[in-house]
């Protein structure tokens, strides 16, 4: 089964889903970081992982 056929919950961690959802809703790295008590660079790292796992190139 390819990545595109699996539900996101089988590909992404709960934290990645949480961050990706917030980002998709228009939240900035800083706002997400503040809400989750993490660094903005950690948000960026999680989103990079999401893009890689979902095979998003840009």
Image: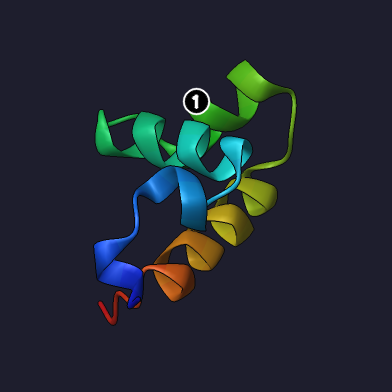
Q: Residue at x 35, y 78 (%)?
A: 55
**In front here: 39 or 51?**
51
Closer to us: 58 or 52: 52
Local packing at callout 1 (Cα closer than 10 Å; few below 14, some 14-19, many 20+) is some
Q: Write the residue at 46% across / 43% down.
A: 9
| Residue carrying label 1 | 31
Residue 34 point in image, percent of width and height: 63, 22
Q: Secondary structure at mark 1?
A: helix
* Horizontal relation, residue 51 to residue 5: left or right: right
Q: Residue at x 47, y 60 (%)?
A: 50
The type of colouring in the image is: rainbow
Location of residue 36 with respect to 15 vertically, above or below? above
* Quarter of the figure with residue 58: bottom left
In this rendering, position of residue 58 left or right of residue 14: left
In this picture, residue 50 sits left or right of residue 8 = right
- Relative height, residue 51 to residue 39 (above, below): below
Q: Position of residue 4 (x, y in %)?
A: 26, 68
């Amino acid at each position: 089964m390819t990545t595109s056929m699996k539900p996101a919950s089988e590909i992404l961690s709960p934290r990645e889903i949480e961050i990706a959802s917030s980002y998709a809703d228009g939240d900035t790295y800083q706002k997400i970081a503040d809400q989750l008590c993490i660094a903005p660079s950690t948000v960026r790292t999680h989103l990079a992982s999401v893009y890689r796992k979902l095979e998003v190139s840009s």
